[in-house]
Amino acid sequence: MRTALVIGTGLIGTSAALALAGRGIAVHLRDHDPASARTAAALGAGTDDPPEGPVDLAIIAVPPAHVATTLAEAMRAGLARGYLDVASVKGGPKRELEQLGLDLTAYIGTHPMSGKERSGPLAATADLFEGRPWVLTPGRDTDTEVLNLALELVALCRAVPVVMDADAHDRAVALVSHTPQLVSSMVAARLEEADETAVRLCGQGIRDVTRIAASDPRMWVEILSANPGPVADVLAGVAADLDETVRALRSLESTDEEKRREGTSGVEDVLRRGNAGRARVPGKHGAAPAQYETVAVLISDQPGELARIFADAGRAGVNVEDVRIEHATGQQAGLVQLMVTPSAAPVLGEALKERGWALRTS
């Protein structure tokens, strides 16, 4: 690949353009809003000048509802040797293209499994896709050259290719992406009219659950509108669990001992199934989930403190597998939770205490 055309200079399109431009590809940018393309160009993602002839690869980075029409226009104009889209839904756009009677040998549907709560070119980064899965959904007629161009794009963005059927992809993202977005938003919506005293008690748990609720509603309406059936199917299962859990909790209010036992069993059941599901989430670098121990360190909110902790962990020969920070309410301090292998936890704890750090024991 030497040349590329990115149509749609939002977060995903601009991030892909930045990655390609940074690796020597001549990238051309186009957007229905010329100011967005100019912004992406100013960030170093390429040029908003049109290409002089067909490019090697056209990357369609527009909302799902506009993928088919945008692709059709690009293909009829002969803008590229190969075409792909990066929309988060794959089955619907593919069927729309088939209905338009287009030759799909030069097209492949793809979806990089990466993003942010923020949108637009200013949120884009060249490393957005690094180490993340990038789904490819080739059809029976997909040309080998086009598949190779898509694989080259994934490699240049330093992502990890995953090949799936288009409809299987849509069911999968309904479960692991689209439904979590709605559930997060539903939980966050409970805070809208909550008493200020209650909101001030928010800790890391509510922050974790509601983080993605900060996403752009207009963007998500477009995504969910393109995949409503599979998302509704997953939500129906969640709703059934909610109904059962509500009944179990009501039973716990009862003075009848038998009803209370039933309530306890119902609540325990959903919590245990949650444990089992969480245990299936891939661990570090996509490997099997690993069990870590947490070393909790009290830290002041001052420049250089985090760097000092990591440096001390390095001197102790301990690799920090993951980290979380919980900020204290009303104080310039917090709790840094360092996740390490079980064998490394006592080594790290002793090393940090020797260097003057205050540890919180469970």
Image (cartoon, rainbow, N blue to C red):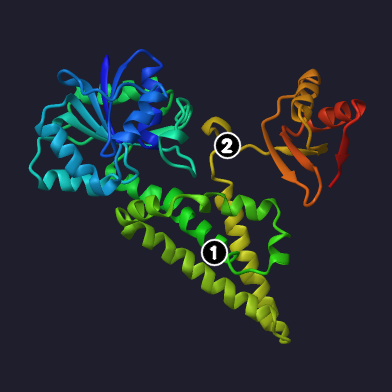
Q: Position of residue 340 (x, y in %)?
A: 72, 32
Looking at the image, residue 56 lies above or below residue 344: above
Q: Secondary structure at mark 1?
A: helix
What's the residue type where badge 2 is placed?
Gly
Q: Residue at coordinates 68% horizontally, 62% vertically from top-left?
A: 199
Which quarter of the figure has residue 228? Answer: bottom left
Is 206 displayed left or right of 122 in the figure?
Answer: right
- Which dot marks residue 189? 1
From this viewpoint, is residue 136 visible? no
Q: Count every numbered label the image shows and give the total.
A: 2
Which of 132/86 is in front? 86
- Mark toward the start of the polypeptide (2 vs 1): 1
Q: Secondary structure at mark 2?
A: loop
Q: CA distance from mark 2 to mark 1?
A: 30 Å
Q: Position of residue 184 (x, y in %)?
A: 53, 57
Q: Residue at coordinates 51% horizontally, 59% vertically from top-left?
A: 185
Characterize the local packing of mark 2: few (<14), some (14-19) or many (20 or more) Cα atoms within 10 angstroms: few
What's the residue type where badge 1 is placed?
Ala
- Which dot marks residue 356? none
Characterize the local packing of mark 1: few (<14), some (14-19) or many (20 or more) Cα atoms within 10 angstroms: few
Q: Position of residue 52 (x, y in %)?
A: 16, 18
Q: Residue at coordinates 15% horizontally, 19% vertically from top-left?
A: 53
Which of 127/218 is in front? 218
| Residue reaching furthest to the left | 101
Query: Mark 2 highlights which residue?
Result: 283
Q: Residue at coordinates 39% horizontally, 48% vertically from top-left?
A: 172
Which quarter of the figure is the N terminus placed in? top left
